[in-house]
Image (cartoon, rainbow, N blue to C red):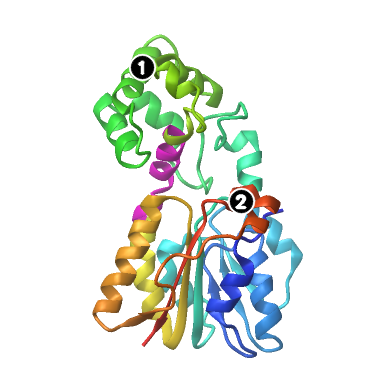
């Protein structure tokens, strides 16, 4: 099960009180949602949005009191709320990390350590897969996403080798792609602390799920639906996400629409990282609507 990252810090900045309603825009297995429901009981509710069909079905079976779960993308936040009226919204949370369940299932194709199909879709209703990108997209477009979304130094070399290899054989598996990357990157990169496929896999996942575009769509909607004094918390896991959140908060604060609750991002303490190593790159930013 997914361990909620920065749980105590999220509760501190959301500050849920009895009877208040919240939106968990990335519900997952409801770790954060349940923590909020313990604070806003007995009459408070949480609207949980979960794009991943498997996670949605799993949490729906739990029938958690006070939690209404919707299988949709937070990019459509305003419409989701319109269809599931909760009344006044006191806080919105985005946890942009992936669940252990997603990463650990080889058939989802998210992990370069497990051999599975090159899928990487959060929702099986999406059409685009990572396999389609590496097998059908032009070399220039592949290089572009590796550079911009993966911040991959060797984006040109990797894109070129993908094209070369796919001309011989369709690239369908995660380990197949890992081998293509390892074959072309300099030896020094193979000995580094970060796995040589990390950035390529990140770039493909971001592209498949339009993660940055969806975040840019969702943040203004979240602010719009918050009542005065409502709080917005966002946990990001890489610099591209954090930059979007940071700039959005900065612009809205400058316009007097919000006040920042975190001047700098809040990061996990050593104890949490030891218990949950995947939390190490988490950054929490929070603001209150004026």
Q: Position of residue 138 (x, y in %)?
A: 27, 26
What is the magenta range? Answer: 200-213
Q: Position of residue 54 (x, y in %)?
A: 64, 50
Residue furthest to the right in view is 62
At 36% across and 79% down in the image, what residue appears?
A: 224
Q: Position of residue 64 (x, y in %)?
A: 73, 71
Quarter of the C terminus within the rendering: bottom left
Q: Tell me: 140 left or right of 191.
A: left
Residue 76: quarter of image: bottom left
Secondary structure of the residue carrying tag 1 is helix
Q: Between residues 283 and 141, which one lies in front from this camera angle?
A: 283
- First in sequence: mark 2 vs mark 1: 2
Q: Which residue is mark 1?
A: 161
Q: Between residues 132 and 176, which one lies in front from this camera angle?
A: 176
Q: Tell me: 18 left or right of 82.
A: right
Q: Tag 1: Cα neighbours inside 10 Å, few (<14), some, or many (≥20)?
A: some
């Amino acid at each position: 099960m997914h361990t909620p990252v920065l749980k105590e810090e999220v509760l501190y900045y959301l500050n849920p009180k009895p009877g208040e309603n919240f939106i968990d825009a990335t519900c997952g297995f409801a770790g954060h949602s349940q923590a909020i429901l313990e604070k806003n009981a007995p009459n408070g509710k949480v609207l949980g949005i979960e794009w991943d069909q498997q996670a949605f079905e799993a949490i729906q079976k739990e029938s958690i009191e006070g939690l209404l779960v919707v299988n949709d993308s937070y990019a459509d936040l305003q419409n989701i709320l319109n269809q599931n009226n909760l009344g006044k919204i006191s806080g919105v949370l985005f946890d942009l990390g992936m669940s252990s369940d997603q990463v650990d299932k080889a058939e989802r194709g998210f992990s370069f350590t497990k051999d599975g199909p090159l899928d990487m879709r959060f929702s099986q209703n999406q059409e685009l897969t990572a396999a389609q990108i590496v097998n059908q997209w032009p070399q220039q477009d592949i290089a572009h996403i590796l550079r911009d979304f993966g911040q991959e130094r060797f984006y040109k070399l990797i894109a070129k080798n993908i094209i070369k290899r796919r001309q011989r054989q369709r690239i369908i598996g995660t380990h197949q792609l890992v081998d293509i990357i390892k074959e072309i990157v300099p030896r020094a990169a193979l000995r580094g602390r970060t796995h040589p496929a990390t950035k390529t896999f990140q770039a493909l996942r971001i592209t498949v799920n339009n993660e940055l575009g969806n975040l840019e769509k969702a943040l203004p909607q979240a602010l719009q639906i918050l009542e005065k004094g409502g709080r917005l918390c966002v946990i990001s896991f890489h610099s591209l996400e954090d930059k979007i959140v940071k700039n959005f908060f900065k612009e809205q604060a400058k316009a007097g629409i919000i006040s920042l609750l975190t001047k700098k991002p809040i990061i996990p303490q050593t104890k949490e990282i030891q218990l949950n190593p995947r939390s190490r790159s988490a950054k929490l930013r929070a603001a209150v609507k004026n």
